[in-house]
Amino acid sequence: MLDMSNRTTPKTPAKREIQIGVRLPQSLVADLDSYVARRLADEPGIDFTRSAAVRVLLSKALAAEQGGVK
């Protein structure tokens, strides 16, 4: 799994966002971490976190479910 201990959380989000929490099986977290690692390797210099990955993947899944991939 990725070492996320050095990540910081912004004190004030740019937009009003709702924070949610979910429990995930360890295998899904491992898959998520692999996705984050691939994105970081593909695009050096970006700051891509688990949270960002969840937002991207959830947006894509919902768009696909609604019939139009983003």
Image: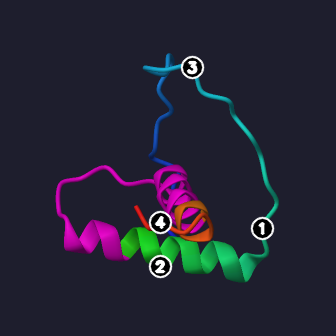
Q: Nearer the viewer, mark 2 or mark 3?
A: 3
Question: In the image, 69: left or right of 38?
Answer: right
Badge 4: few (under 14), some or many (20 or more) residues near its Cα, within 10 Å?
few
Which is more toward the observer, 59 or 66? 66
Q: How far apart are marks 1 and 2 (CA)?
A: 15 Å
Query: In this figure, which residue is indicated by the disc labeled 1?
Result: 24
Majority SS type along the magenta span: helix
Q: Residue at x 74, y 77 (%)?
A: 26
| Helix, strand or loop at mark 2 | helix
Query: In this figure, which residue is indicated by the disc labeled 4?
Result: 68
Q: How far apart are marks 4 and 3 (CA)?
A: 26 Å
Query: In this figure, which residue is indicated by the disc labeled 3?
Result: 16
Q: Which residue is drawn at 51% across and 19% down?
A: 11
Mark 1 or mark 2, earlier in chain: 1
34 to 50, vertically: above or below: below
Res. 1 in view: no
Res. 47 in view: yes
Mark 4 or mark 3, earlier in chain: 3
